[in-house]
Amino acid sequence: MEIIRFSDLLAAQANALGGKRNSPHTKLRIQTETARLLEASGYDSLSMSAICEQVGLTRRALYLHYKNKEEIVLDLSRALFKAEAQLAPSLTDCKNLAEAIYKVCRWYVHFHLGSGALYTTLMEIRRPSMEARELWAARTDNLLGILIYQYKQFKEFREVDPDWAVFCILSVARAINATVDRIGFSPEPENVRQYCDRIDEEVVSFSKMMYQTLVAKPWPLASG
């Protein structure tokens, strides 16, 4: 599974507009370049001046769209969570619950590797920002709903207490988030590739942990 940076997804959306110099195109360019700056140096180093320089806008033009860097990050987060929900994998081709869990864990790890800088930034501003906390809570509820709806096609999952299922899903998600933060994400493709084997091992480990905790049975797959 290819690791795709969220900034590249935004750039593709901007390019799809055909280079039109209108408000939606400009906002996408601002979001794209802000995401790239976050990937390169993090939230603390981010400034409106740096964003202006990166995008090629005057301060006045930038302030027509955003008052401060937090507004841009919150808009980026909305776009990120929308993409996350849209790219959540279909589980209709999975033969059993274990395969489904592995598929979800693999997607979640790779998606977060490509968006790690923004997830980390949102975690940083979540404490002082009520809006960031509300965004994160809504994202969690939405993603849980998408995954649980799909997991319910498997009898093993339907037999699990719903509250326990939510606890298991969130626990594994937190473990994945912590691991991705620890590994870090480099915007250089050659540096990303060196993590791939290690990440695949982590995916199998997360999948086993969730399955065994969820249904209290041995992992049934011979390999990931």
Image (cartoon, grey):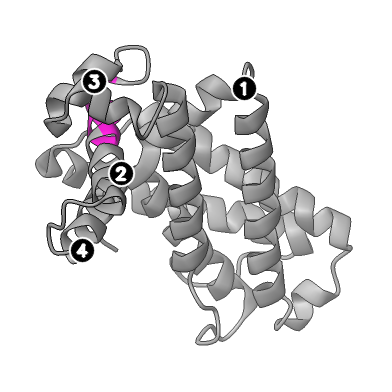
Cα distance in 3D space between marks 2 and 1: 22 Å
Sequence-first tag of 3 and 2? 2
Residue identifier under label 3 = 59
Q: Does 157 sit above or below residue 59?
A: below
Residue 77 in percent (x, y) is at 47, 41
The magenta segment: 34-41
Foreground: disc 2 or disc 1: 2
| Residue 43 as seen in the image, left or right of residue 206 | left
Residue 169 in percent (x, y) is at 68, 53
Note whether residue 73 is visible: yes
Q: Which mark is residue 27?
A: 2
Q: Does 215 sit above or below residue 180?
A: below
Magenta span has 40? Answer: yes
Residue at the image position 64 percent from the left and 67 percent from the top: 146
- Image quadrant in which the C terminus is located: bottom left
For residue 37, what is the image quadrant?
A: top left
- Residue type, numbered disc 1: Ser
Sequence-first tag of 4 and 2? 4
Residue at the image position 41 percent from the left and 46 percent from the top: 112
Residue 139 in percent (x, y) is at 62, 49
Sequence-first tag of 1 and 4? 4
Disc 2: CA contacts within 10 A as few (<14), some (14-19) or many (>=20): some
- Image quadrant in which the N terminus is located: bottom left
Foreground: disc 3 or disc 4: 3
